[in-house]
Amino acid sequence: MRRVAVAGVGLIPVKEYWDRSLQSLFAEAALKALKDAGTDKVDSVYVANMSGSFMQDQINMGALVTDSLGRPGLPAVRVEAGAASGGVAFHEAVKAVASGYSECVLVGGAEKMSDVLPEAATTALVMSEEQEYTAYTGVTQAGLSAMLHRLYLDLYAEPAQVGMMAVKGHDHSVGCKHAQYPFRMSIDRAMDSPMEADPIHMMECSGVGDGAAAMVLVPAADSGVEVVGSAVATDCCSLAIRRDPLIFESVRRAAEKAYSMAGVKPDDIDLAEVHDDFTINGILSLEALGLAGWGEATKLVAGNATDKDGKIPTNTFGGLKARGHPLGATGLYQVAEVALQLRGAAGDHQVPGAEVGLAQSMGGMASVSAVNILRRFGV
């Protein structure tokens, strides 16, 4: 298998694009990535999208985005894995280059959530869950996360300790040009905000936004940012039949494989981008990744360990809560942000001396997860 490098990165701000189409968002991010890579010689395209078939009544996304790029002859594949779509698409693109099947791959994600009413967005989110025995009850993804949140509070933490996950994300988002909500937020504001699903407050939830992110992958040369670990794993869809609902088994399994591929351990990770659509999911992700002990992640976020200068800087551009969570594009924002850090191109968000970074995304209640590990080399 060949080594794989990130040659180009393209991001657009996460916000509400009322006058733009889904394919135009993808095209903008893709063209930025191609320009950054200094090439247009792409031989395959992967596009991550979760809900275009529901929100825009649009399928056949691969052909749609290659047409928007003016490259209708390219082979293109849509990847859908709930909110893990971006991370899984990146994994598939890595395999295409590593296997020798492709020499230059464009992988991008796009989502346009502002086209639908809030209740439709809620419906789209819960479509990641099993419909016949879970979603039919009327439970939302916020409701499912609230069950985990309540159990975690009963066993391990106080509400404000979990809420610090959102506070730290907002601290990191300040000055980020592609962040949806780049402002600081106090823990009092988070805890005083209305309940979304008890005990989850509104300011502990990611918002609704549109966005697109893209990267160009090529065989690795002698310098740059290399993909050293990439893995995807699944778990039982129902929380009710898991051995321990507070253990994200798919995250743990994907992380173990990615660590093994990369030849690293959790202590070797210099920064992490984790899936924090709700604060509790960010906390549980840190634990499943081995970056914190079980029941101990709140100690990291309550202190300074996840700060830019801490032991394990986390969500250094704001995470899903503050940078934004455009579903299928989110995983690619995460990997791109890690790549920018390892390039030394993160500006005011730069983690000093960062050499190894991790991005973790998940679909549903961690029924599918992707973990991608990048390393700076030769520089």
Image: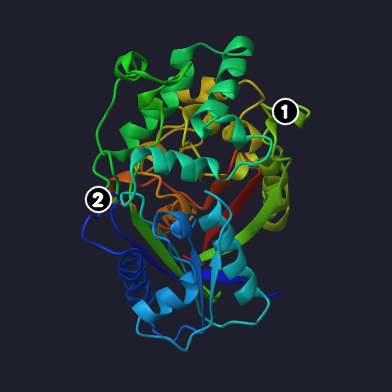
Q: Which residue is mark 1?
A: 240
Badge 1: residue crowd in 10 Å (few <14, some 14–19, many ≥20): few
Image: 216 above or below 114: below
Secondary element under disc 2, as helix, strand or loop, is loop
Q: Does residue 278 lie above or below 271 as drawn?
A: above
At horizontal 35% and vertical 26% (from top left) the residue drawn is 203
Residue 53 x, y percent position in the rendering: 47, 60
What x and y, as percent, mark residue 100?
65, 81
Q: Of the residues tagged 2 and 1, which is closer to the observer?
A: 1
Quadrant of the rendered structure where residue 94 is? bottom right
Q: Is residue 85 visible?
A: yes
- Category of crowding for the residue at label 2, using alpha-carbon neighbours closer than 10 angstroms: few (below 14), some (14–19), many (at least 20): some
Near-viewer residue (72 or 165): 72
Placement of 214 over or under 45, stated as above or below: above
Marks 2,1: beta carbons within 8 A: no
Mark 1 secondary-structure assignment: helix
Q: Position of residue 188 (x, y in %)?
A: 31, 14
Looking at the image, how many numbered discs can be counted on the residues? Answer: 2
Please state which of residues 321 and 37 is positioned toward the viewer in this rendering.
321
Question: Which residue bears the numbered disc 2?
Answer: 177
- Residue 358 x, y percent position in the rendering: 55, 49
